[in-house]
Image: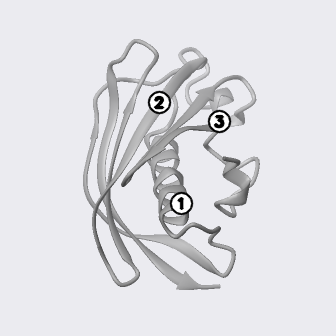
Amino acid sequence: MDIKELIPQREPFLFIDKIIEFEDDKLTTQITFNDRFDFFKGHFPARPVVPGVILSEHCFQSGAALMATLHKKSLSDKIAVVSRIKNCKFKQLCSINDVITTSTELIESMEDAFYLRSIGKNQDGKKVIIIDYVCNLIEE
């Protein structure tokens, strides 16, 4: 499954490298935060850290990909937009060359609203982010 067929984001604002698995109402994605990301130059130069908003965006893009997968099509005629962040916990710092594997699960859906939970873990299996959020489908 090619991520670019599912969501409209493109480099430099595409934060999923690949889809690992899709099963039932769950999608697993992965990203490697390597030196191709310019934010490491300023956040923080002496100790590069992935900004929390970027980790959150990775989860949101994973949620949009799950929504498209559940719809069995791309979201080419609609955009998945985050409408609520209910809960977010950053459990570990994420740094340069960390590989984050994220499991995103559909909790509930009502019409064009999708209640989602993403849990991202680093290459050591430690949780980096846990976030509950709602995405809505809107017309482009």
Query: Around disc 1, counting alpha carbons within 10 Å, would you say few (fewer than 14), some (14 to 19), or many (20 or more)?
Result: some
Q: Is residue 41 left or right of residue 30?
A: right
In the image, residue 74 sits, relative to residue 38, either above or below, namely below
Residue 90, image quadrant:
top left
Q: Nearer the viewer, mark 2 or mark 1?
A: 1
The residue where tag 2 is placed is: 101
Q: Earlier in the sequence, mark 2 or mark 1?
A: 1
**Mark 1 or mark 3, which has the lower sequence index?**
3
For image coordinates 75% across by 47% down, the residue present is 12
Helix, strand or loop for disc 3: helix
Q: Nearer the viewer, mark 1 or mark 3?
A: 1
Under mark 1, the amino acid is Thr
Residue corresponding to mark 1: 69
What's the CA distance linking mark 2 and mark 1? 18 Å
Which amino acid is tagged 3?
Answer: Phe
Within 10 Å of disc 3 (Cα), the crowding (few <14, some 14-19, many 20+) is some
Q: Residue at x 62, y 68 (%)?
A: 73
Q: Percent x, y for residue 41? A: 68, 28
Above or below, comparing residue 31 to residue 52 in the picture: above
Residue 51 location, x and y as percent? 49, 38
Is residue 95 found left or right of 128 in the rendered image?
Answer: right
Which amino acid type corresponds to the residue marked 2 in the rendered image? Thr
Q: Which residue is mark 3?
A: 39
Of labels 3 and 2, earlier in sequence is 3
